[in-house]
Image (cartoon, rainbow, N blue to C red):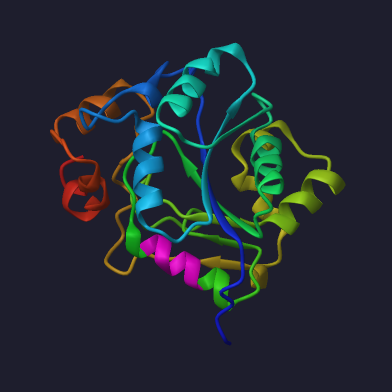
Amino acid sequence: MNSNTNINIGAIILARADSKRLPGKVLLKIDGKNEIFSLLYKNLESLNIFSKVIIATSRDFSDDSIIEVCKLRKMEYFRGDKNNVLQRFTESALSNKFDYVCRFNADSPFLSKELILRGIKKIRENNFHLITNTIKRSYPYGITFQSFSTNFLELISQKVQLSDEEKEHISPISKYLKSHEIAHLKNRYFNMSNHRMVIDNKEDLENINKLNITESSEFFKWKFYAKFV
């Protein structure tokens, strides 16, 4: 099938400042210069494959600190519902007129360029509504690619009575898709699903800090760092 280069593909980074397990984690500067979410923004923009990169946070006052950083660093942002993350994600995609939207979490600073490019290729060459490596995990926890068609997001948000889990975590809405509408991206190397490359608690933060990363671009070298976390 010929590649469709006219698809509007955006990246949305979901960020909140009041994490229960590690409050303020997305504002940490683990490379010495950039907050975790601004680090992600910077690295995703450097790929030059997304029409826009958006920080999607809530309208709650607790996330004003995130907006301050966005304004300071001239990053585009969207504010939506605090607890209904799916609604915030969908509204952000619709307001920016994305055909497909790739989801990234602000507590996962490592990125796989190879995985993202494979996902983008699937978007352009096939008619999937979800492209992901998170349903059948083989990559480390935190090395993710998840892209939804905006049409599917809009349909689900309007037509289906969703559970609180589906609204908060988004991923469970994959159950409303048929198998042929989902593309699974597997690790081409070996199963590394027992590794954690995410900052969800104090132990995760301590492990990441032990890596002594000082340059933003180092976060693309996930295979090298995975063996240390």
Res. 150 in view: yes
Foreground residue among 31 and 110: 31
Number of dots carrying numbers: 0
Q: Left or right: 63 with respect to 187?
A: right
Q: Quadrant of residue 28?
A: top left
Q: Position of residue 113 (x, y in %)?
A: 34, 59
Question: Where is the C terminus found, in terms of image quarters?
Answer: top left
Q: Left or right: 83 with respect to 124?
A: right
Question: Residue at (53%, 16%) from the top-left corner?
Answer: 64
Q: Position of residue 70 (x, y in %)?
A: 46, 28
Q: Position of residue 103 (x, y in %)?
A: 53, 47
Question: Where is the N terminus found, in terms of image quarters?
Answer: bottom right
Q: Position of residue 8 (x, y in %)?
A: 61, 62
Question: Residue at (70%, 44%) from the top-left corner?
Answer: 95
Q: Is residue 166 above or below residue 26?
A: below
Question: Residue at (40%, 26%) from the top-left corner?
Answer: 26
Res. 176 in view: no
Foreground residue among 176 and 110: 110
Q: Is residue 40 above or below residue 29?
A: below
Residue found farthest to the bottom: 1
Question: Residue at (34%, 28%) from the top-left corner?
Answer: 35
Residue found farthest to the right: 159
User: What is the span of residues highlighted in magenta in the rendered image?
Assistant: 115-121
Q: Is residue 43 above or below residue 81?
A: below
Foreground residue among 35 and 112: 35
Q: Is residue 81 magenta?
A: no
Q: Main secondary structure of the magenta part?
A: helix
Q: Is residue 49 above or below residue 19?
A: below
Q: Left or right: 69 with respect to 5?
A: left
